[in-house]
Amino acid sequence: MTGLLHQTLSGLATGGIYASLALALVMVYRATRQINFAQGEMATFSTYVALTLIQAGLPYWIAFAATLLFSFVMGVALERLLLRKLADHSGLGTVGVAIGLLLIFNALSGWLFGFTEKGFPSPFEGAGGGALLGGMLSRHEVGMTGVTLLVLGLVYCFFRFTRLGLAMRAAAANPDSSRLVGIRVGWTLALGWGLAAALGAVAGIMVAPIVFLDPNMMLGILLYAFAGALLGGADNPAGAVIGGFAVGVIENLGGAYLVGTDLKLTLALVIITVVLVLRPAGLFGRAVVARV
Amino acid sequence: MLNRRTLLGSAALVAVAPVLRAHAEDAPGVTAGAIKLGNTNPHSGPASAYGAIANADTAYFNMINEQGGVNGRKIDFISLDDAYSPPKTVEQTRRLIEQDGVAFIFNGLGTPCQSAVRAYMNAHKVPQLFVATGADKWGDYAHFPWTMGWQPSYRTEAAIYAKYLLNEKPQSKIAVLYQNDDFGKDYLLGLKDGLGAKYGEMVVKEASYETTDPTIDSQAVTLQSSGADVLVTAATPKWAAQTIRKIAELNWKPLHFMTNVSVSVGAVIKPAGEQNAAGMITGAYQKDPTDPKWANDAGMQEWLAFMKKYMPGADISDNNHTYGFGVSMTMEQVLKQCGNDLSRGNVMKQAANLKDLDIPVLLPGIRINTSPTNFHPIRAMQLQRWTGKGWELFGSVISA
């Protein structure tokens, strides 16, 4: 029985990792209706920036804020300088550029910061270590889950209660009409990229103390984050977070009690495929209806 | 009639003739004054830290050449960069053999890289000697008679752990965490070799992870709940560091055997927490250049003198440099034994005929032995324990 509880809690902790990156994916998707394959590698790069700032002696939270600002500017710049040029072309062009960015950021991280694993400090753990409940969870995992939920709340409020959020939703849903009512659609897209890059940086900084930082840190996590986002609904931030947690728990319980560890990822993906066949927009997503 | 075509034809024949003669002797890459050896190594890319091995190989052969070479022949060592990418390994290896005309390939690095050229080398009967990887497959003399490893294989290492457990803790219950690929599975095979019929009784739980898994937390929980008091971890550095930290968080204190792939202080133990790793055991076969115990050791003095003269400024705490020194010395011995017959067949025959070769950088009591039915030159290790501050050898040398 404690085994079951333990696997569930451990699954929630891992699910929190997926959920935090899934939020960034949803951010870009809501703003541009596209998936950014480079999201994970951009997040890893931001995490290295944060580590460099911390090692240079900056207090943790100042380094944290500076990294978010840096990532936001980087995201906006990528949209304005690269993706803008492809705006009138097919979605495939954007996908191609995103995959190119994935490779570039991955190589850049390795080239600038090296390939060996690095530890990353946690703001939630004191000198006494971080185990809670007999090691079922660590302080950092609890703190990270809190941060993910906090970010989710902020994203929700941003889209629901601010004019800018409303403008972004409008621009994504109907660019032409939005332009006619005076929304600068180009800048809302850039803003979407910037915010997503900042969310990715939060994810990277929260995940690194758990999985250790190396240039490929987010490569595997991105797969699970996609799965979580699609399961919950790619346009629904809350859905993506729930989806991320669900993937973590399903894979742990399935791996421990049903199919064995070597098939746990497969089991999670099979379940997601079945859900998507039955509900293509995801559990909490809204189907996009396009007029042709 | 003498026309332009016959003239060209005979010119071509003259050009081809020496090549034909070399083939008849089956000693390509060999002249009266030199022998050409090829090598691929990641001088760039994610695994470029291993480039230190090829640098040490090069320096060693420079030393040999300064001393007059082997049997009067200089060693012309060509090391090309494959960036740890198997397609590049294929390209560079073919270039070395077909264009540069090397006698054979020495100390090519990386399991996936060397796997990619193994069939090619064996089909062309070119020795693939002393590959720099720990996979067990390099000792498959029956199917790949032109390929040989050097260091103890993962399987040998696991068998040594099993032997130690059978002798010291025969009642223990063993859990295994392994990477779900050839590397991780070699450890399962080695434990089966070592434990024999007792495997089913002693190993109470096996759990695998994929390299796409972000964490091994779930596996650690599963293994702990099996009630095991020994853990054998066959994981690459990232997951090894996670395992060390997670079992400390779980307050699980098994006797922890860690693959010697993942015992780097900088890349594994420091990120995981030096105290978290206390008590962890691994197998060693080389003298650790950072261990003060060897400060006055004649073998390490010899190595240090070599480093000073032929690799000035290189990092003397990097055990890739002791590795390169040791494997190159083994190569030198093979060439010595070949005498004047440097045909590929004889090189292979002599490589499989090393008897009690003493290499100064290997731990005392570990000797190199090969035979036509033993293509695993090093089959012994000594265990060492992480004290929380450093590695400490204990017990005697164990042979698999």
Image (cartoon, coloured by chain):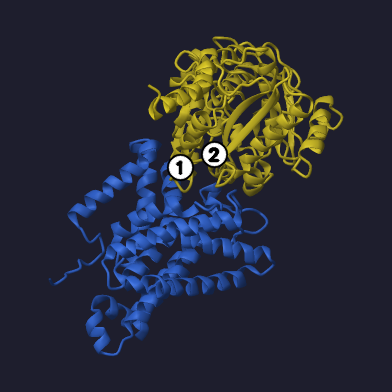
Chain colours: A blue, B yellow
Q: Counting other residues with Cα less than 10 Å from the Cα at mark 2, is it few (<14), some (14-19), or many (20 or more)?
A: many
> Looking at the image, which residue is at 78% across and 45% down?
B313
Q: Amino acid at mark 1?
A: Thr
Residue B30: percent from the left, percent from the top? 61, 21
Q: Determine whether B42 is above or below B397 in the image.
A: below
Residue B192: percent from the left, percent from the top? 50, 19
Q: Are marks 1 and 2 on the same chain?
A: yes
One can see residue B78 in this view: yes
Q: Depth check: B299 or A199 in front?
A: B299
Asked whether the beta carbons under mark 1 and mark 2 sit within 8 Å of each other, the answer is: yes
One can see residue B255 in this view: no
Report the residue that reaches farthest toward the front.
Answer: B1
> Looking at the image, which residue is at 55% across and 70% down?
A67
> Looking at the image, which residue is at 41% across and 56% down?
A18
Horizontal relation, residue A13 to residue B363: left or right: left
Residue A230: percent from the left, percent from the top? 29, 58
Q: Disc 2 designates what residue?
A: B236
> Looking at the image, which residue is at 22% across and 67% down?
A286
Q: Amino acid at mark 2?
A: Thr
Q: Depth check: B365 or A4 in front?
A: B365
Mark earlier in primary sequence (1, 2) = 1
User: Spatial distance from mark 1 to mark 2, Cα to Cα?
Assistant: 9 Å
Residue A215: percent from the left, percent from the top? 52, 53
Q: Determine whether A105 is above or below B10 in the image.
A: below
Q: Disc 1 designates what residue?
A: B211
Rendering quarter of residue A52: bottom right
Horizontal relation, residue A292 to residue B399: left or right: left
Q: Counting other residues with Cα less than 10 Å from the Cα at mark 1, is it few (<14), some (14-19), or many (20 or more)?
A: some
